[in-house]
Image (spheres, helix red, strand yellow):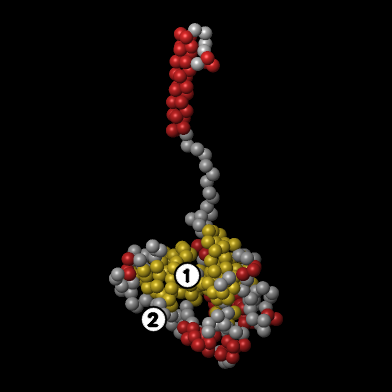
Amino acid sequence: MDRVRKGSDSQTATWLLGWTFRVRTWAKIIDTVLENHVPITRQKKTPSSMQIRLNDKQLLETHHTMEPHFQPGTFSPLRAGEDHILCNDARLSYMELGTLVSQFTGWDLERVLDDVIVRLHCSARVLHSSGETRTYWCTDTQYRRGCRRDKVEIDLGRRRVGVAELTSFIELSGIDGDVLHGAIIRWMDKSPRSTETDEFDRPLCPFPLSFNHCLWRWADAGRNRASFGIRGFRATVDRHNLWRHVSQNDRQRVITSELRARYDIIRLDSIKRHVNVHEDPSTGDMLQTLNII
């Protein structure tokens, strides 16, 4: 009490009452200001469109026997490769890829085959317009555990969703100097074992799995791929060690399963999200889990 004494006891009591009043008044003022004050926080910037970052360490390369025909680090000119398979991680032919690039860009096929510079990557770091960042992989040999091919949901428009497997990320140096990016995919289709669809037109599994699982199968191109019918195809497979990630006992079965595979090139902003899809070995259908519980 001696530390705050202000003269007589009466004067000290009066000063303490005033001090208490001032403290309470200022406390109320501070509380009122804090209630009405909206703190300024740093807003995380989100891109207006999807962005992609490619690393040359994940650049795919052609077979060493084909290298003299192409520009270093590219698969160009595509015409030089004809109906041969690009490489083990991207099992399309040069002509197939040229046709897909022409359809994707609207460029003349002849000029695509001769003039467009094509680079393929087995991985990409993607920044979605939602702000989510994810690294996608599409390789049978270059992931740290060897094989990783991500499956993704594709926006088909009108609230419809499709599913595909990533084959490669593609970088195109265009005819007019433009650089375009896209993703090569292998499409899946609805399994005939599915009889119901959800609000996004995804094929649901039969009950009781229908609440959380969809059922897909590999899409059929409607014809055999010309690259699989060229003379000496099997010798080329052995010489270039294609499908080397598959055991010898299963190799022919896997090759046959890709005979009518349907490929496409899509815009990166068509990719909605990564999905969990696994093959049912008893039927060959692909089981998609909608939510991990």
Q: Residue at x 53, y 84 (%)?
A: 247
Q: Residue at x 48, y 55 (%)?
A: 130
- Label 1 vs label 2, nearer the camera: 2
Residue 122, by quadrant, is: bottom right
Question: Is any part of residue 254 visible from this angle?
Answer: yes
**Coordinates of residue 41 in the picture (x, y in percent):** 52, 42
Near-viewer residue (173 or 122):
122
Judging by the rendered image, the residue that carries numbered circle 1 is 151
**Residue kind at label 1, given as amino acid type:** Lys
Question: Is any part of residue 108 visible from this angle?
Answer: no
**Coordinates of residue 65 in the picture (x, y in percent):** 67, 84
Near-viewer residue (107 or 72):
72
Upstream in sequence: badge 1 or badge 2: 1
Q: Indicate whether 134 appears above or below 24.
A: below
**Residue kind at label 2, given as amino acid type:** Ser
**Mark 2 nearby-residue class (10 Å; few <14, some 14–19, many ≥20):** few
Q: Is residue 213 left or right of residue 140?
A: left
Which residue sits furthest front?
2
**Coordinates of residue 99 in the picture (x, y in percent):** 54, 77
Near-viewer residue (6 or 66):
6
The span from disc 1 to disc 2 (Cα, nearest Å) is 20 Å
Judging by the rendered image, the residue that carries numbered circle 2 is 282
**Circle 2 — which element?**
loop
Q: Residue at x 52, y 52 (%)?
A: 46
Q: Residue at x 48, y 11 (%)?
A: 12
**Circle 1 — which element?**
strand
**Mark 1 nearby-residue class (10 Å; few <14, some 14–19, many ≥20):** many
**Coordinates of residue 60 in the picture (x, y in percent):** 62, 74
